[in-house]
Amino acid sequence: MTTLRQALARPWIPPEYGKRQYLWLLSLGYLFWKFAYVTPSALEVVLLALTLVAFFALYCCSYWARGWQVHACVAAGCVIGALWARWNPGAASFFIFACAMCARIPLARRAVGGMLAVVGAGVAASFVIEGPMQMMFLMPLMLVGLPVGLSTLMDERQRAARAQLLRKQEEVEHMARIAERERISRDLHDLLGHSLSLIALKAELARKLAGRDPEACAREIADIETSARTALAEVRTAVTGYRESGLAQALASARASLQAADVVLDERVERIDLAPAVEHVVALAVREAVTNIVRHARASRCTLSLSREQGNAVLRVHDDGRLRNTDELRHGNGLAGMQERVAALGGRLKLAAGDGLALELQVPA
């Protein structure tokens, strides 16, 4: 029961494919071209409606299918097309969709072989059609079927490559965080271990001298003060270094990720002294923006700038990718968390879609 409830709760098509996949269903309108010249019977209309509902379920299932399930979806699409071929030349659309489903077969050569088999099955099904309607069935299948399948196959391979790149990026960032924690722990031990041991020893000596040699006790207390101030200065210096490495590390990771994704980076970053909390938010925003570019944008160029404007630190990231709205970034990408962190600092975060996607973050510097 739990598994069924989870299956019903999930979206029809995986979110990483975007909403564009639903638009391809509009090509099923070719099934209704016949009705411009022939008045359908009530039975035909009912059967066609039931077929479209069943095919919509099959189409959505094909995106979740794995292994033998993909072959089953392809075969079901061909069967539906063959059953309708004699009565409606628009049934060629079902074979074209079956070619696209073949793209989810793991091996490329098997996927291409499946597409050729689907086209062959469509040609075989066309022999039951009589008269000029046979050409109306074959023409879209022969001209569109294989190109659609091959383009879908390339899109699947590109999506898999982006997913692998993101996994490697996450692994690199995880290892970098572990190394940074180890470095911080070593630095704190080296900085404070000796100083705190010295302060403890001098405090113990001052306690012993307090009753019998006030002058020596005062000198020890003065040494304690000096040692404490020195240790405090060293800690501040170390913290400043951590702050600088936080944003610097995020920028270095962004360069590496964009270079791996073949995205040209135009970087214009000014050196700004930021509070630790502000720099942390800016560094997270850089990582999140670059991750979205690699995952969604399919961009070729990216502009990243950081400047100080009217007392604010302003981060701008713009790419020339395919995104024309922000709907594809609403699921599981961290933008909501970033918005909350920015708001907590009294800043603002804006996303603008148009010629690619532009992110602008402003926080008090």
Image (cartoon, rainbow, N blue to C red):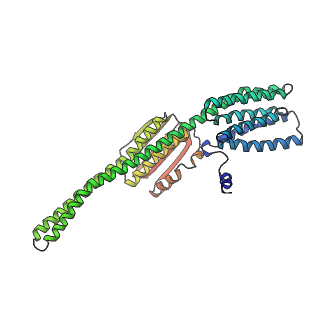
| Quadrant of residue 57 within the rendered picture | top right
Q: Residue at x 35, y 50 (%)?
A: 182
Q: Furthest-front residue in view? A: 68
Q: Judge from the rendering whether residue 133 lies leftward or rightward of residue 93; answer left or right.
A: right
| Quadrant of residue 42 within the rendered picture | top right
Frontmost residue, 92 versus 323: 92
Q: Position of residue 111 (x, y in %)?
A: 65, 31
Q: Position of residue 108 (x, y in %)?
A: 61, 31
Frontmost residue, 117 versus 328: 117
Frontmost residue, 45 versus 125: 125
Q: Position of residue 244 (x, y in %)?
A: 35, 47
Q: Judge from the rendering whether residue 334 lies leftward or rightward of residue 103; answer left or right.
A: left
User: How many labels, in total?
Assistant: 0
Q: Furthest-bottom residue in view? A: 211
Whether residue 356 is visible to the viewer of this picture, yes or no, is no
Is 182 drawn above or below residue 94 in the view shown?
below
Quarter of the figure with the N terminus: bottom right
Q: Residue at x 59, y 45 (%)?
A: 328
Q: Residue at x 40, y 46 (%)?
A: 176
Is 241 drawn above or below residue 143 in the view shown?
below
Whether residue 103 is visible to the viewer of this picture, yes or no, is yes
Q: Judge from the rendering whether residue 341 lies leftward or rightward of residue 241; answer left or right.
A: right
Q: Position of residue 272 (x, y in %)?
A: 36, 47
